[in-house]
Amino acid sequence: MGGFEDDEPPSKRARASSVESANLPENFCYSKSINPLGGTMARPLASQGKEVMVGSKGVIKRDEFVRIITKALYTLGYEKSGAVLEEESGITLHSPSVNLFRKQVLDGNWDNAVATLNKLGLLDENIVKSAAFLLLEQKFFDLLRNDNLMGAIKTLQNEISPLGVNRKRVHEMSSCIISSPQNFLLAFPKLGTEASDSRLKLLEELQKVLPPAVMVPERRLENIVEQALTVQREACYLHNSIDGLSLYVDHHCGRDQIPSRTLQVLCAHGDEVWFLQFSNNGKYLASSSNDKSAIIWKVDEDGELLLKHRLTGHEKPVMMVAWSPDDSQLLTCGMEEAIRRWNIESGECIHVYEKPGLGLTSCGWFPDGKQILCGLSDQSLCLWDLDGKEADCWKGQRSSKTSDFAVTKDGKVIIIMNRDSTILLFNRDTKQERLIEEDNTITSFSLSDDGDFLLVNLISEKIHLWNIRNDPSRVKQYIGHKRSRFVIRSCFGGSDQAFIASGSEDSKVYIWHRATEDVIETLSGHSGAVNCVSWNPTNPHMLASASDDHTIRIWGLKKASTKRKDIGSSSSSNGTHMNGSANGNGFVHQCNGSRSK
């Protein structure tokens, strides 16, 4: 359908979704030899031209199909191609009266535009009035922009008010017209825009009001294609693809898109690894261990993890870590000891948080990154400024040894344990308290990225998924993993967090389909209990697991060509060089930051 030479690349072509064929030069004519394939291949045969429906199912109306394609061509800036399609198909995008109406709108010829509107044959009087209101409102703005105050008042009184449409808006216009120009601009930002821009936006608003058979909606073809791709993605049971969906083939993900193959074994810890967590940007992994240290691992461009910093200074095992919202800092929490704040780039300890006579049991960041939360051994929860000054403290809220807590991204709801089998959802603004009540002891929990769901691990070897958007309700249950003595942690993960992963005391990692509760993968490789798992938030093909066997395993796709690497062990069976020890590529950092008590 080409045949025309464009001097400019597509990115330089003028957007023509509103002007369309009206912008073609007057001397432009349709060539009869534009088909690059030759002959009349691109032209419909006489019998084909009479067909009303197209497509194998016979459910697509030919004229509508051609019109939305034409509209898409104009929207993309392919004016000549759009005009040629109208000529070849004999199906015009708009009727002559609609084209006239559009031109009058773009020219600001409001009185004639209203007159043409009434000649379009619209049967619904409410639609006519709503469209007329939009036109006359723009006329009102133009008069004010040109300092024609009396003309604006007459338009408001004699043309807009009698329509009986959007009386609240009419009242605003009436009250603001006597205000100062500054107040009027605040109330009606349209006045601050160029006339041409406001008229283009007006056409888009009119397209929403008028029937689609009269004016084809903007970007209709794109919307239809997006809907089709969305349906395919939602129907894909194992959807976990990094690449976008293709228009060339129907979308389908197999099990090969689930991380289930060990790509690396990180052996830099000298004792059981209890906790690990990817940074928010997915570029780092932090781990903590019974060896009283934490390690920051860097994910390089090839997806390989390299030891960046070893953080030492805790006098007791490091229970957990927490990334700052911007991933520039890390908190580490010793077992009923102190919390330390570290600089990620330098690996230096910035601050030490302590409470005289009490041990700190958990740590986390407030969403603004300016405050931290900590659980204390007296079962209270405190909010501290970064310099260690106490900003708030909730005492007596808990009677559970489980120290987990979470905060929604808006900072409004704090989620904490208050009894062995009960979780408290506390709204800081309204002081409202909601409860999640389980029949068994809760060992850990984690919050979904959207803040609407809570994953709760139980001592009964069950994991429950709770919807906490409104009144808490249990919606799913995941079973199969083993837990008898230790705290086992689970996580959301994969594309759109469509999967649930958990450690297990049988040395395996379990992965469930979040919606169906089915176990889709059981990952073997560890030789001790798997205490914690973390799914890379920006790479659905990367999963990490921490184990009592002193190692961290990085799981990826089975088809990955990367050879397995054992990082941090000088006696690696595959001969890879040691880059996870203190003498390798990483650095040991003693904590010598400022202290607050």
Image (spheres, rainbow, N blue to C red):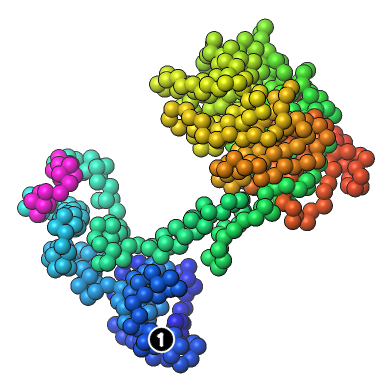
- At 35% from the left and 67% from the top, the residue drawn is 17
The stretch in magenta equals: 159-176
Q: Which residue in the structure is indicated by mark 1?
A: 43
Q: Main secondary structure of the magenta part?
A: helix
Neighbours of disc 1 within 10 Å: few (<14), some (14-19), many (20+): some
Query: Could you tell me the amino acid type at mark 1?
Result: Arg
In the shown orientation, is residue 359 left or right of residue 175?
right
Q: Is residue 13 magenta?
A: no
On-image quarter of the C terminus: top right
Residue 548 appears in the figure:
yes
Q: Is residue 389 left or right of residue 174?
A: right
Rendered residue at 52%/52% (across/down): 234
Residue 173's place in the image compared with 72, above or below, is above
Quarter of the figure with residue 84: bottom left
Whether 367 is drawn above or below 38: the answer is: above
What residue is drawn where x is 56% and y is 27%? 406
